[in-house]
Amino acid sequence: MCSTKKYRRSLSRCKRCIQLLKICQHDVNKIAVFLRCFNRKVPMNLFREAKRLNLKYLGIILVLLLIMTDIGYSRRQFLSVGTAPPGGAFFVVGSAIAQVVNDNLGDLSWQVSAEATKGTQENIRRLRNSELDFALANAAISYFAVRGQGAWKEKYPVRVIMTLAPNVAFFITQKSSNIKKIIDLKGKRAVVGPAGAGFEYFLKPILQAHGVSYQDFTPLHNTQLGSVDMLADGSAKAAFLGGAVPTASIVQASASQDIFFIPFDEEAKKQLFENYPFFAPATIPANTYRNQLQPFDGMNVGSMHLVTSADVDEKKVHHFTRILYEHRHQVAKKHPAGKAINPKNIVRNTGTPFHPGAIRYYMDIGIWPKDQ
């Protein structure tokens, strides 16, 4: 059967369909099945009547129906939302966003779907190349990408649609270790996140503010859950973990080990908040994790946010923003991070410009900050 993967129609398709018709000429029911592969509902009585017609007329009917189908699908826009590898919050939240928008399109001829990717850095590159329409990203990585700083060799046209859930992260170690402050990491082995995930965009400024660099200790790479195992077997003395609170990896670590949350220096935090808009205070309530008897003054090291390219049509972004905001409660039902889609949080500035289409919608409903 003809492929419908991207519904890219051409005259050659009709020729292939006629060839199939010749194969199926003694079984009209097969033609009905064939048409249904195009998601085109064809009344079976049409084919009952067609049995009394000459086959060439049936061929004409088939071709006309396929042309009508092509016209309908040519008006449909297929929009993709880049996420991250399956298993993490980015993938779940991105999938929820795509599904909620797709379920509430109204008269829009869109087909919105989530796409698993390697994460923020791939998403930003593919947005620039028009391989994705929307994507989730970490605000710290977007901050440097839009400026062409760090490992980004050029300025990428990233634009924010809405700021989402905070990424609350910090170093943990075992209570039995002699690491009580970030500066104590010097000379130790510490996990700094998965290779290629981009943790260095927010971790290097944090370390620098505490008088530490990657050259002062042995940086190791692993997944968050893998980092917990490395703490347990002693192959690492500390690990930088985080995400939406509560974070699964920290839950596991606190359940299986006696862990210590390494605090941020107050002066260092003040410096970070002044220099980088993507950093923000974040307090973890007491008893969030096992044996955590007191609130912990952590830090949002770069919120998850929904982004697009500056080249994407303003009207399209306006519609997407409107649908998502109006049905935000449906996202929250699918993942707790959806609760961050609220009037105060979604317009929070993290240092990357907002898309004009999103700004226009927020101004329409009166939540866009006057000083932003």
Image (spheres, rainbow, N blue to C red):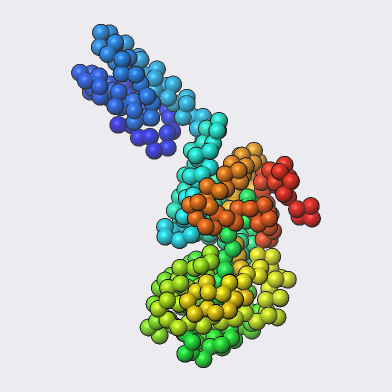
Q: Is residue 344 above or below residue 62?
A: below
**Relative vertical location of residue 104 with respect to residue 340 in this rendering, above or below:** above
Q: Is residue 77 left or right of residue 361?
A: left
Q: Nearer the viewer, residue 131 or 231?
A: 231
**Residue at position x 51%, y 67% in the image:** 246
Q: Position of residue 81 (x, y in %)?
A: 51, 48
Q: Position of residue 289 (x, y in %)?
A: 50, 74
Q: Tell me if 369 is positioned left or right of 283 in this view.
A: right
Residue at 68% x, 61% y is 351
Q: Position of residue 99 (x, y in %)?
A: 48, 44
Residue at (64, 48) in percent of width and height = 310
- Residue furthest to the left in view is 26
Examine the image and state in which quarter residue 186 appears. Answer: bottom right
Q: Residue at 53% across / 52% down in the picture?
A: 332
Q: Is residue 259 left or right of residue 270?
A: left
Q: Quadrant of the C terminus?
A: bottom right
Figure disc tally: 0
How far across and how far down the image is residue 369, in percent?
A: 75, 53
Query: Where is the N terminus found, in terms of image quarters?
Result: top left
Q: Is residue 264 left or right of residue 111?
A: right
Q: Note whether residue 153 is visible.
A: no
Residue 100, compared with residue 35, is above or below; it is below
Looking at the image, the residue that sits furthest to the right is 371
Q: Is residue 121 visible?
A: yes
Q: Quadrant of residue 46?
A: top left
